[in-house]
Protein backbone atom coordinates (compact mmCIF):
# COMPACT_ATOMS: atom_id res chain seq x y z
CA UNK A 1 0.00 0.00 0.00
CA UNK A 2 1.52 3.38 -0.93
CA UNK A 3 2.45 5.63 1.97
CA UNK A 4 0.77 8.96 2.53
CA UNK A 5 2.84 11.67 0.78
CA UNK A 6 4.96 13.83 3.03
CA UNK A 7 3.48 17.31 3.44
CA UNK A 8 5.10 20.24 1.76
CA UNK A 9 5.44 23.65 3.35
CA UNK A 10 2.09 25.45 3.33
CA UNK A 11 0.13 22.40 2.22
CA UNK A 12 -3.45 22.31 3.51
CA UNK A 13 -4.24 19.60 6.11
CA UNK A 14 -6.90 17.97 3.91
CA UNK A 15 -4.23 17.25 1.28
CA UNK A 16 -2.19 15.24 3.84
CA UNK A 17 -5.02 13.09 5.24
CA UNK A 18 -4.63 9.31 4.70
CA UNK A 19 -7.27 8.22 2.20
CA UNK A 20 -9.95 5.77 3.30
CA UNK A 21 -10.11 4.25 -0.19
CA UNK A 22 -7.82 3.03 -2.97
CA UNK A 23 -8.27 4.09 -6.57
CA UNK A 24 -9.31 1.17 -8.76
CA UNK A 25 -9.59 0.60 -12.49
CA UNK A 26 -13.01 1.75 -13.65
CA UNK A 27 -14.39 -1.08 -15.79
CA UNK A 28 -18.05 -0.70 -16.60
CA UNK A 29 -20.52 -3.32 -17.77
CA UNK A 30 -22.40 -2.49 -20.99
CA UNK A 31 -25.49 -1.35 -19.05
CA UNK A 32 -23.37 0.76 -16.71
CA UNK A 33 -21.59 2.32 -19.68
CA UNK A 34 -24.89 3.23 -21.33
CA UNK A 35 -26.14 4.82 -18.13
CA UNK A 36 -22.87 6.70 -17.68
CA UNK A 37 -22.89 7.97 -21.26
CA UNK A 38 -26.55 8.97 -21.48
CA UNK A 39 -27.88 9.76 -18.01
CA UNK A 40 -25.11 10.72 -15.63
CA UNK A 41 -25.85 14.43 -16.06
CA UNK A 42 -29.27 13.87 -14.48
CA UNK A 43 -27.68 12.67 -11.26
CA UNK A 44 -23.96 13.36 -11.08
CA UNK A 45 -23.11 16.76 -9.60
CA UNK A 46 -20.25 18.67 -11.18
CA UNK A 47 -17.83 19.09 -8.28
CA UNK A 48 -15.15 21.74 -8.65
CA UNK A 49 -11.73 20.10 -8.19
CA UNK A 50 -8.52 21.46 -6.72
CA UNK A 51 -6.59 20.43 -9.83
CA UNK A 52 -7.23 18.41 -13.00
CA UNK A 53 -5.19 15.47 -11.69
CA UNK A 54 -7.03 15.44 -8.33
CA UNK A 55 -10.21 13.95 -9.74
CA UNK A 56 -11.87 13.19 -6.37
CA UNK A 57 -10.84 16.38 -4.60
CA UNK A 58 -13.19 19.16 -3.55
CA UNK A 59 -12.03 22.74 -4.10
CA UNK A 60 -12.07 24.71 -0.83
CA UNK A 61 -14.25 27.40 -2.44
CA UNK A 62 -16.88 24.98 -3.80
CA UNK A 63 -20.14 24.25 -1.92
CA UNK A 64 -22.94 21.79 -2.61
CA UNK A 65 -26.23 23.72 -2.82
CA UNK A 66 -29.03 21.22 -2.19
CA UNK A 67 -31.86 23.70 -2.77
CA UNK A 68 -30.40 24.66 -6.16
CA UNK A 69 -29.75 21.04 -7.18
CA UNK A 70 -33.18 19.72 -6.23
CA UNK A 71 -35.17 22.85 -6.93
CA UNK A 72 -36.79 22.82 -3.51
CA UNK A 73 -36.13 22.94 0.22
CA UNK A 74 -36.55 19.52 1.85
CA UNK A 75 -34.81 17.31 4.44
CA UNK A 76 -31.47 16.09 3.07
CA UNK A 77 -30.06 12.61 3.69
CA UNK A 78 -26.50 11.80 2.63
CA UNK A 79 -25.02 8.32 2.36
CA UNK A 80 -21.24 8.00 2.21
CA UNK A 81 -19.91 4.99 0.35
CA UNK A 82 -23.06 4.02 -1.50
CA UNK A 83 -21.47 1.08 -3.33
CA UNK A 84 -23.87 -0.20 -5.98
CA UNK A 85 -26.57 2.22 -4.84
CA UNK A 86 -28.99 -0.36 -3.46
CA UNK A 87 -29.68 1.45 -0.18
CA UNK A 88 -29.76 5.07 -1.33
CA UNK A 89 -31.93 4.38 -4.39
CA UNK A 90 -34.43 2.43 -2.31
CA UNK A 91 -34.50 5.24 0.26
CA UNK A 92 -35.03 7.91 -2.39
CA UNK A 93 -37.83 5.94 -4.03
CA UNK A 94 -39.50 5.21 -0.67
CA UNK A 95 -39.27 8.78 0.62
CA UNK A 96 -39.96 11.29 -2.16
CA UNK A 97 -40.46 13.97 0.51
CA UNK A 98 -36.72 13.83 1.26
CA UNK A 99 -33.73 14.62 -0.93
CA UNK A 100 -30.93 12.05 -1.02
CA UNK A 101 -27.25 12.50 -1.83
CA UNK A 102 -25.03 9.54 -2.66
CA UNK A 103 -21.28 9.88 -2.16
CA UNK A 104 -19.17 7.27 -3.96
CA UNK A 105 -15.62 7.34 -5.33
CA UNK A 106 -15.75 4.33 -7.69
CA UNK A 107 -17.12 4.96 -11.16
CA UNK A 108 -18.73 1.49 -11.52
CA UNK A 109 -20.61 2.15 -8.28
CA UNK A 110 -21.78 5.54 -9.53
CA UNK A 111 -22.88 4.01 -12.85
CA UNK A 112 -24.72 1.19 -11.06
CA UNK A 113 -26.55 3.74 -8.92
CA UNK A 114 -27.64 5.58 -12.06
CA UNK A 115 -28.91 2.31 -13.58
CA UNK A 116 -30.91 1.55 -10.44
CA UNK A 117 -32.27 5.08 -10.21
CA UNK A 118 -33.70 4.83 -13.71
CA UNK A 119 -35.87 1.89 -12.67
CA UNK A 120 -36.73 2.82 -9.08
CA UNK A 121 -39.70 5.10 -9.71
CA UNK A 122 -40.92 7.66 -7.19
CA UNK A 123 -44.00 5.88 -5.89
CA UNK A 124 -43.31 3.98 -2.62
CA UNK A 125 -46.21 1.63 -3.46
CA UNK A 126 -44.45 0.58 -6.66
CA UNK A 127 -42.06 -2.02 -5.29
CA UNK A 128 -40.40 -2.84 -8.59
CA UNK A 129 -40.35 0.61 -10.09
CA UNK A 130 -41.51 1.48 -13.58
CA UNK A 131 -38.72 1.26 -16.18
CA UNK A 132 -37.66 4.67 -17.36
CA UNK A 133 -39.20 6.53 -14.42
CA UNK A 134 -36.32 8.60 -13.08
CA UNK A 135 -35.85 9.68 -9.49
CA UNK A 136 -35.91 13.44 -9.05
CA UNK A 137 -34.78 13.43 -5.39
CA UNK A 138 -31.37 11.81 -5.86
CA UNK A 139 -27.98 13.32 -6.67
CA UNK A 140 -24.54 11.70 -6.73
CA UNK A 141 -21.24 13.23 -5.65
CA UNK A 142 -18.08 11.46 -6.81
CA UNK A 143 -15.67 12.92 -4.29
CA UNK A 144 -13.54 12.31 -1.23
CA UNK A 145 -16.03 12.21 1.64
CA UNK A 146 -13.80 13.76 4.29
CA UNK A 147 -13.01 16.76 2.09
CA UNK A 148 -16.67 17.08 1.21
CA UNK A 149 -17.71 17.23 4.87
CA UNK A 150 -14.82 19.51 5.77
CA UNK A 151 -15.58 22.29 3.30
CA UNK A 152 -17.85 21.08 0.47
CA UNK A 153 -21.11 21.24 2.43
CA UNK A 154 -22.63 24.20 4.28
CA UNK A 155 -22.64 23.76 8.04
CA UNK A 156 -25.78 22.17 9.55
CA UNK A 157 -27.12 21.34 6.06
CA UNK A 158 -27.91 17.63 6.55
CA UNK A 159 -30.77 15.96 8.40
CA UNK A 160 -29.16 12.52 8.33
CA UNK A 161 -25.71 11.17 7.53
CA UNK A 162 -25.31 7.45 6.76
CA UNK A 163 -22.05 5.51 6.82
CA UNK A 164 -22.87 1.88 6.08
CA UNK A 165 -20.17 -0.78 5.78
CA UNK A 166 -17.10 1.40 5.23
CA UNK A 167 -13.85 -0.41 4.48
CA UNK A 168 -12.71 -1.86 7.86
CA UNK A 169 -9.02 -1.79 6.95
CA UNK A 170 -8.48 -4.76 9.28
CA UNK A 171 -4.68 -4.73 9.42
CA UNK A 172 -3.29 -2.71 12.30
CA UNK A 173 -0.93 -0.72 10.08
CA UNK A 174 -3.88 0.42 7.96
CA UNK A 175 -6.16 1.56 10.79
CA UNK A 176 -5.18 5.16 10.07
CA UNK A 177 -7.08 4.81 6.80
CA UNK A 178 -10.40 4.04 8.49
CA UNK A 179 -13.07 6.59 7.72
CA UNK A 180 -14.72 6.66 11.15
CA UNK A 181 -12.45 8.40 13.65
CA UNK A 182 -12.68 11.24 16.18
CA UNK A 183 -11.73 13.65 13.39
CA UNK A 184 -14.52 12.31 11.19
CA UNK A 185 -17.00 12.68 14.06
CA UNK A 186 -16.11 16.38 14.14
CA UNK A 187 -16.81 16.63 10.41
CA UNK A 188 -20.12 14.78 10.81
CA UNK A 189 -21.09 17.20 13.57
CA UNK A 190 -20.25 20.14 11.36
CA UNK A 191 -22.66 19.18 8.56
CA UNK A 192 -25.56 17.82 10.64
CA UNK A 193 -28.20 20.18 11.99
CA UNK A 194 -29.03 20.03 15.72
CA UNK A 195 -31.21 16.96 16.14
CA UNK A 196 -29.79 15.43 12.98
CA UNK A 197 -28.93 11.72 12.98
CA UNK A 198 -25.64 9.97 12.22
CA UNK A 199 -26.26 6.30 11.37
CA UNK A 200 -23.52 3.71 11.01
CA UNK A 201 -23.32 0.00 10.29
CA UNK A 202 -20.47 -2.49 9.93
CA UNK A 203 -20.08 -6.26 9.77
CA UNK A 204 -16.56 -6.08 11.22
CA UNK A 205 -16.97 -6.56 14.99
CA UNK A 206 -13.78 -4.79 16.08
CA UNK A 207 -14.51 -1.80 13.85
CA UNK A 208 -18.00 -1.68 15.35
CA UNK A 209 -16.47 -1.33 18.80
CA UNK A 210 -14.28 1.49 17.50
CA UNK A 211 -17.26 3.25 15.91
CA UNK A 212 -19.23 2.99 19.15
CA UNK A 213 -16.34 4.41 21.15
CA UNK A 214 -15.88 7.26 18.67
CA UNK A 215 -19.56 8.22 18.73
CA UNK A 216 -19.89 7.95 22.51
CA UNK A 217 -16.79 10.11 23.02
CA UNK A 218 -17.91 12.86 20.62
CA UNK A 219 -19.21 15.81 22.66
CA UNK A 220 -21.42 16.99 19.78
CA UNK A 221 -23.45 13.75 19.78
CA UNK A 222 -25.42 11.59 22.15
CA UNK A 223 -26.08 7.90 21.66
CA UNK A 224 -29.77 7.51 20.82
CA UNK A 225 -29.83 4.18 22.70
CA UNK A 226 -27.66 5.09 25.66
CA UNK A 227 -23.90 5.30 26.04
CA UNK A 228 -22.25 2.00 25.22
CA UNK A 229 -25.31 0.58 23.46
CA UNK A 230 -25.76 -0.42 19.85
CA UNK A 231 -28.93 0.35 17.86
CA UNK A 232 -31.49 -2.08 16.46
CA UNK A 233 -31.20 -2.70 12.75
CA UNK A 234 -32.20 0.46 10.91
CA UNK A 235 -35.31 -0.45 8.93
CA UNK A 236 -34.43 2.15 6.30
CA UNK A 237 -31.32 0.17 5.37
CA UNK A 238 -32.28 -2.47 2.82
CA UNK A 239 -30.47 -5.79 2.75
CA UNK A 240 -27.75 -5.31 0.16
CA UNK A 241 -25.74 -7.97 -1.61
CA UNK A 242 -22.69 -6.89 0.41
CA UNK A 243 -24.47 -7.31 3.76
CA UNK A 244 -25.94 -10.64 2.71
CA UNK A 245 -22.48 -11.90 1.79
CA UNK A 246 -21.16 -10.92 5.21
CA UNK A 247 -24.00 -12.67 7.02
CA UNK A 248 -23.45 -15.79 4.94
CA UNK A 249 -19.80 -15.72 6.03
CA UNK A 250 -20.93 -15.72 9.66
CA UNK A 251 -20.34 -12.07 10.49
CA UNK A 252 -22.90 -10.11 12.53
CA UNK A 253 -23.84 -6.50 11.83
CA UNK A 254 -23.44 -3.65 14.30
CA UNK A 255 -25.87 -0.73 13.87
CA UNK A 256 -25.28 2.59 15.63
CA UNK A 257 -27.32 5.78 15.91
CA UNK A 258 -26.05 9.11 17.24
CA UNK A 259 -27.99 12.37 17.46
CA UNK A 260 -26.44 15.79 16.99
CA UNK A 261 -26.80 17.91 20.12
Image (tube, rainbow, N blue to C red):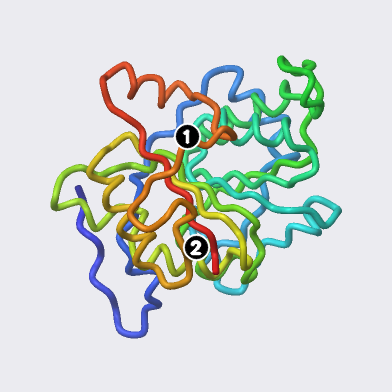
Q: Where does residue 236 sit, x and y in percent of width and height?
A: 59, 35
Q: Element at badge 2?
A: helix
User: Which residue does the image show at 56% across and 55% down from the upper left?
Assistant: 197
Q: Which residue is mark 1?
A: 233
**Which residue reaches farthest right?**
71
Q: Is residue 260 left or right of residue 42?
A: left
Q: Residue at x 66, y 53 (%)?
A: 46
Q: Is residue 118 above or below residue 217?
A: above
**Residue 250 at what x, y percent from top left?**
26, 21
Residue closer to the observer: 123 or 233: 233
Of the residues under marks 2 and 1, which one precedes in the sequence?
A: 2
Which of these two is toward me, 164 or 130?
164
Quarter of the rendering containing residue 230: top left
Q: Which residue is rendered at x = 61% and y = 74% of the image?
A: 61
Question: Distance of mark 2 from mark 1, alpha carbons?
Answer: 21 Å
Count the numbered circles shown. 2
Amino acid sequence: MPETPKPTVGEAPHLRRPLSYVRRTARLTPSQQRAWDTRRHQYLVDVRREAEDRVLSVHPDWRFDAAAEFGRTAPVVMEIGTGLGECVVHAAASHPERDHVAVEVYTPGVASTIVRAGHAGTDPADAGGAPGQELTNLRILQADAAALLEHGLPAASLDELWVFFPDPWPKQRHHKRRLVSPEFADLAARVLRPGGVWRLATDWAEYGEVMLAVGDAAEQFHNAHGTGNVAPRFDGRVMTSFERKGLTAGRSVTDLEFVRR
